[in-house]
Image (spheres, rainbow, N blue to C red):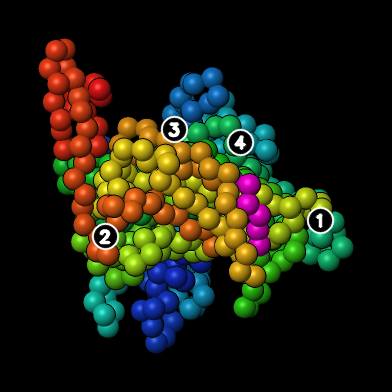
């Protein structure tokens, strides 16, 4: 049985719509993509090097391709078609909600497209879900499904366990990461140069998000008062910084690394940075109530921003960052609230976890405040850190101490 592309692409197509609708394609066309399947050797580009599952006991189990690869064609909002591939992996010890140990990876990147404005590079899209070859889709038990007479929209693939972290390693010479967004808990994304390109390591846990009734023209998940169910998803996409629509840094004055923003929203737009207000805004949307029709859906937002990016965008050094991070949630009626906020620095990355807000379609606003350092233009602020090595004390213009030194 082949994977259900509509399930796998429910959020993906929203991303494609935002990224490419401004290119004003005048007619439907077939758009070429590069699909990533398992590498034949370690030097191959644009392929999946490995898929690893980390279990709660800390053990790492490497997945093995089963040889099953599915190909299908799907159509976006503009009726442009793309051909996709999905590959099945077996991970010993893994147990999906269907009782199997099979995972499917769907990884692709849209090839550069020439438009009237120039060349647009698109995004790398990564989805993991439980295989449908060995297990049928699961019928949701929501009263909404039963009372409405819906059948197909209430069928979903089995779920991956939320307590298992999945790590995907890719080789590619087609990507220049600008920012990453999607639905993965505790997401991380690292890169290193290799001969012929780069190797990217992307990891995190599945996150539970609400699923809603079938899409209707002019509606979004927040227009539905109640979710059908909460299901585990693992989906991230990385926008190429060379894309015409990429303007995270404000006129691209500086390099901000690859910030990661993730949420449990059923639908999320493209994060946007306003150089005038120094705010990053993210429009999200989900049904207000869970499947029981009583319990409100509680929002969860996570951001992983390189310290160099914070210095670049906000002119704020890494000193006392915890007290300078601000998250606000603005609702459609104009009211706002402050989410529960937990922040901290891990290595070269500032981590933000915000939760406790509600849906349906709020706008999340993130900023750092430092009145003396914020400027009207985005320039790279000089970082300083005092480090010690034995009896030697030195001040470095970096976010952290170099090898052999400890922060004083």
Residue 387 position (above or below residue 205):
above
Q: Would you call the spot at circle 4 few (<14 residues within 10 Å), some (14-19), or many (20 or more)?
A: some
Q: What span is in magenta?
A: 355-360
Q: Nearer the viewer, mark 3 or mark 4?
A: 4
Q: Would you call the spot at circle 3 few (<14 residues within 10 Å), some (14-19), or many (20 or more)?
A: some
Q: Residue at x 20, y 24 (%)?
A: 387
The x, y position of residue 393, in whole percent, is 14, 21
Quick one: label 1 or label 4, which is nearer the N terminus? Answer: 4
- Identify the residue at the far bottom of this view: 26
Query: In this rendering, would 193 be left or right of 125?
Result: left
- Residue tagged 1: 293
Instruction: Give me the disc on residue 375.
Output: 2
Quadrant of the rendered image containing residue 249: bottom left
Q: Is residue 357 magenta?
A: yes
**SS of the residue under disc 4:** loop
Instruction: Give me the disc on residue 161.
Output: 4
**SS of the residue under disc 3:** strand
Q: Nearer the viewer, mark 1 or mark 4?
A: 1
- Can residue 336 be seen from the camera position used here? yes
Gap between marks 1 and 4 measured at Cα: 25 Å
Residue 123 position (above or below residue 400):
below
Gap between marks 3 and 4 measured at Cα: 14 Å
């Amino acid at each position: 049985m082949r994977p259900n592309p509509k399930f796998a692409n429910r959020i993906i197509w929203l991303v494609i719509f935002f990224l490419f609708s401004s290119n004003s394609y005048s007619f439907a066309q077939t758009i070429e993509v590069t699909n990533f399947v398992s590498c034949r050797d370690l030097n191959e580009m644009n392929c999946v090097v490995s898929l690893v599952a980390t279990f709660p006991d800390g053990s790492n189990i490497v997945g093995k391709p089963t040889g099953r690869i599915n190909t299908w064609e799907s159509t976006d909002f503009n009726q442009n078609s793309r051909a996709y591939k999905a590959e099945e992996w077996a991970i010993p010890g893994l147990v999906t909600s269907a009782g199997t140990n099979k995972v499917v990876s769907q990884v692709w990147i849209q090839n550069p497209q020439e438009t009237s404005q120039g060349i647009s590079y698109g995004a790398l899209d990564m989805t993991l879900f439980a295989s449908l070859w060995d297990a049928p889709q699961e019928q949701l038990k929501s009263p909404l499904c039963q009372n409405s007479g819906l059948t197909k929209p209430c069928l979903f693939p089995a779920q991956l366990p939320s307590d298992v972290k999945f790590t995907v390693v890719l080789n590619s010479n087609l990507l220049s990461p600008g920012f990453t967004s999607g639905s993965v808990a505790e997401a991380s994304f690292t890169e290193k140069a290799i001969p012929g390109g780069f190797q990217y390591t992307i990891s995190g846990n599945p996150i539970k998000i609400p699923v809603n009734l079938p899409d209707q023209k002019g509606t979004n998940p927040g227009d539905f008062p109640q979710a059908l169910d909460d299901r585990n998803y693992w989906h991230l996409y990385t926008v190429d910084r060379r894309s015409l629509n990429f303007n995270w840094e404000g006129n691209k004055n500086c390099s901000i690394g690859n910030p990661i923003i993730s949420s449990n929203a059923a639908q999320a737009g493209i994060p946007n940075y306003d150089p005038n207000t120094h705010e990053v805004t993210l429009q999200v949307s989900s049904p207000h109530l869970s499947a029981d029709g009583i319990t409100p859906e509680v929002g969860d937002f996570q951001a992983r921003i390189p310290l160099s990016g914070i210095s670049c965008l906000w002119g704020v050094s890494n000193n006392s960052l915890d007290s300078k991070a601000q998250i606000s949630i603005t609702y459609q009626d104009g009211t706002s609230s402050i989410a529960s906020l937990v922040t901290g620095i891990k290595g070269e990355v500032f981590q933000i976890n915000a939760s406790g807000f509600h849906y349906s379609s709020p706008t999340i606003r993130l900023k750092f405040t430092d009145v003396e350092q914020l400027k009207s233009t985005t320039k790279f602020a000089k970082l300083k850190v005092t480090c010690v090595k034995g009896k030697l004390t030195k001040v470095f213009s970096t976010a952290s101490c170099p090898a052999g030194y400890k922060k004083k």
